């Protein structure tokens, strides 16, 4: 499939007129109360809540490229408030009520992000929608039902979730061979570049300094060293998510997993009438190599998925450009689920990286001795999770004893990833097994393939 534009960070920036002009870099050595490394959602939300809580704080954010360069400006636009990590893993170091409280706090991020954007006048194309996870074969339908049972078992409000049969799912979106779906209510669609750029402008208005085109070379107690000078600060927050492995000393902290997307030309009204999708639902499936999609403000379809999952040594892409093989895979997923789209042009393709801890469970924390904090490892749920990170880091930095700082992801210790080439071999083996498992299930296997379980054991997924 030929694509008209590849990279240039993401379609979301093309949608708002292109890549923004960078802010000025760090002017030299400066002093601050809090230094934040990374001007994405995590860093910006942290700065926002700190400034709101204590306006006198001197906060400096340093960013290698520009605010929103990373996953914050490239993601699928799912403000889901979802809980995509292992509850059982958190339970090992916590309690059931605490895990349920974390789950509820994550769900509450949807309302909180919408509250702030409305209060601060940020237009990010936010629309409250349902999340529709479809099944197109028997094994996928089994997983849909299992997910529904698990959510109920973990005290999710039954009014927020429902199972649809084939007819009801097709009435929502005319997916080929759909057999059923899980619906989660209370989520939202966003235009991520609009959101992250709006947040950056907002914290600047509050007096936060954002220094772009500034590369961090070292993080240590009391200082952030860059190619433009040093920020001396009593508290430092590392908010680098998928780019964490590029910081000296953090090479094995989180794995940089790749995800990519394509976007169609705007669909004519006649085609939307044929497809449905009138509720603008977030759309995903239960394949092991899963996909994620949305219907955009101007009537396009974005379709995302893994593509080439991992580059050796946690290397990252160049300005969002992705491989032709990945574009072809995503187009195949789109037209398999929605064959009605087969004659549409694909106008833009791009990719980015997300952070993955060794146990695939996100963390946030602050070391009391070094006063170095962190948040991330969201494994693809960063639009909503980063908001909760920002609020939690605010409380940790200010020493507040709140319900947020007692949630089970706070100050959780996770062992590092293995050195290369074991990381590369493990991740690529996992996704190859996932592909084989999907093929077996698509060919008629009634239950989840054992190959998928083997894939999970290899990497601790």
Image (cartoon, rainbow, N blue to C red):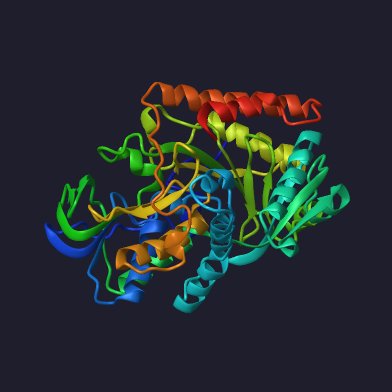
Residue at image coords 48%, 50%: 74
Q: Which corner quadrant holds the N terminus?
A: top right
Percent across and percent down for residue 268 are: 72, 55
Percent across and percent down for residue 98 are: 54, 58
Does residue 165 lie above or below 306 as drawn? below
- Return the residue nearer the eye: 189 or 140: 140
Percent across and percent down for residue 217 are: 20, 43
Does residue 90 lie above or below 114 as drawn? above
- Return the residue nearer the eye: 283 or 197: 283
Quick check: can you spot residue 238? no
Q: Residue 333: name its quadrant.
A: top right
Residue at image coords 52%, 70%: 112
Q: Horizontally, is 20 left or right of 72 in the view?
A: left
Q: Horizontally, is 280 left or right of 174 in the view?
A: left
Q: How many marks?
A: 0
Give the residue furthest to the right. Answer: 167
Q: Which corner quadrant holds the C terminus?
A: top right
Percent across and percent down for residue 171 are: 84, 55
- Return the residue nearer the eye: 4 or 208: 208
Does residue 215 lie above or below 324 as drawn? below
Residue at image coords 56%, 46%: 85
Residue at image coords 53%, 43%: 89
Quick check: can you spot residue 437? yes
Q: Horizontally, is 381 left or right of 64 in the view?
A: right
């Amino acid at each position: 499939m030929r694509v008209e534009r590849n990279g240039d960070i993401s379609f979301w920036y093309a949608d708002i007129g292109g890549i923004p002009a960078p802010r000025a870099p760090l002017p030299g050595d400066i002093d601050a109360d809090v230094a934040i490394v990374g001007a994405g959602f995590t860093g910006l939300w942290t700065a926002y809540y700190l400034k709101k809580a204590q306006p006198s704080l001197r906060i400096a954010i340093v960013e290698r490229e520009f605010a929103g360069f990373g996953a914050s400006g490239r993601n699928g636009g799912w403000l889901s408030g979802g809980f995509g990590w292992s509850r059982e893993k958190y339970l090992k170091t916590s309690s059931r009520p605490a895990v349920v409280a974390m789950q509820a706090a994550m769900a509450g991020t949807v309302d909180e992000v919408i509250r702030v954007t409305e209060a601060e006048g940020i237009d990010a194309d936010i629309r409250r929608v349902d999340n529709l996870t479809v099944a197109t074969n028997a094994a996928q339908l089994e997983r849909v039902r299992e997910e529904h049972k698990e959510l109920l078992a973990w005290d999710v409000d039954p009014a927020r979730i429902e199972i649809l049969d084939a007819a009801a799912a097709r009435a929502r979106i005319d997916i080929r061979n759909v057999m059923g779906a899980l619906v989660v209510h209370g989520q939202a669609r966003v235009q991520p570049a609009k959101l992250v750029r709006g947040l950056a402008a907002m914290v600047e208005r509050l007096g936060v300094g954002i220094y772009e085109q500034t590369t961090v070379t070292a993080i240590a107690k009391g200082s952030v060293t860059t190619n433009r000078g040093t920020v001396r600060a009593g508290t430092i927050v590392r908010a680098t998510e998928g780019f964490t492995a590029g910081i000296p000393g953090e090479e094995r902290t989180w794995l940089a997993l790749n995800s990519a997307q394509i976007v169609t030309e705007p669909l004519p009204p006649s085609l939307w009438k044929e497809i449905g999708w009138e509720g603008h639902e977030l759309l995903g499936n239960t394949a092991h190599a899963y996909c994620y999609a949305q219907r955009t403000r101007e009537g396009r379809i974005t379709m995302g998925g893994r593509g080439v999952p991992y580059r050796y040594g946690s290397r990252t892409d160049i300005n969002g450009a992705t491989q032709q093989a990945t574009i072809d895979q995503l187009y195949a997923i789109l037209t398999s689920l929605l064959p009605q789209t087969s004659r549409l042009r694909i106008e833009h393709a791009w990719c980015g990286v997300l952070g993955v801890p060794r146990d695939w469970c996100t963390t946030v924390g602050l070391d009391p001795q070094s006063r170095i904090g962190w948040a991330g490892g969201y494994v693809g749920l960063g639009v909503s999770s980063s908001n909760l990170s920002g609020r939690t880091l605010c409380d940790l930095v200010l020493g507040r004893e709140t319900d947020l700082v007692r949630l089970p992801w706070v100050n959780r210790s996770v062992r590092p990833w293995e050195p290369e080439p074991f990381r590369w071999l493990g991740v690529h083996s996992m996704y190859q097994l996932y592909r084989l498992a999907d093929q077996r299930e698509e060919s008629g296997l009634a239950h989840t393939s054992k190959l998928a379980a083997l894939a999970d054991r290899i990497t601790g997924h």
